[in-house]
Image (cartoon, rainbow, N blue to C red):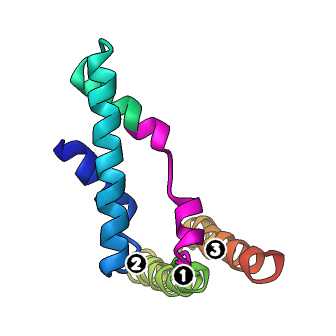
Amino acid sequence: MKKIQNHIDELFKDIPSNSEIEMVKQEIVQNLEEKVFYLIEHGKEEDDAINKAIVEFGDIDDLRKELNVKQPEKKNMAKLNLEFSIWGSSLIIAFFIFINLYYTPNTIWAIYPIFAILWWPLSMYFVWSRKQFGE
């Protein structure tokens, strides 16, 4: 029943391992395997029985609360995305201005792609401000 063991290991990947956690994991695996054997005895195919046992087990949110394990905090990447978009768009705009002035100094055409490029940092600013002030 390697599939059950892999599923439980995946569910517990964010939880620091200790003897209590390992005991809980083994107990869950054992219970799921018993459920699979029960389902097989009652006419289910092995793969169907394994999938049904896993689906009926669900997630481990209640178990996390019981074991006093906190959810890992998600990093706010909005500021980094904003900074990257500002620097990236600045370099692209400088490149277009250079090409415009070097190859066709009498025709100013670089303003058109610059308007399109400015939407990137503008959209990242709105994402950053929504995360900063909205949540």
Q: Is residue 70 magenta?
A: yes
What percent of the width, then of the height, locates residue 105?
Answer: 48, 80
Image mark for residue 99: 2
Q: Residue at x 17, y 46 (%)?
A: 2
How packed mark 1 is, by other alpha carbons closer than 10 Å (few <14, some 14-19, many 20 or more), is few
Where on the picture, by quarter, is residue 71? bottom right
Distance CA(mark 2)–CA(mark 3): 26 Å
What percent of the width, then of the height, locates residue 23?
Answer: 32, 68
> Marks 3 and 1: in contact by CB < 8 Å?
no
How packed mark 3 is, by other alpha carbons closer than 10 Å (few <14, some 14-19, many 20 or more), is many
> Marks 2 and 1: in contact by CB < 8 Å?
no
Q: Secondary structure at mark 3?
A: helix
Q: Which residue is mark 3?
A: 124
The magenta stretch is 54-71
**Image quadrant occupied by the N terminus:** top left
> If you read the primary sequence from the N terminus, does the residue marked by circle 2 or circle 3 appear first?
2
Q: Is 61 placed left or right of 8 in the picture?
A: right
Q: Is 105 placed left or right of 28 in the picture?
A: right
> If you read the primary sequence from the N terminus, does the residue marked by circle 1 or circle 2 appear first?
1
The type of residue carrying mark 1 is Lys
The type of residue carrying mark 2 is Ile
What percent of the width, then of the height, locates residue 78?
Answer: 60, 79
Residue lying at the far top of the rendered structure: 43
Q: Secondary structure at mark 2?
A: helix
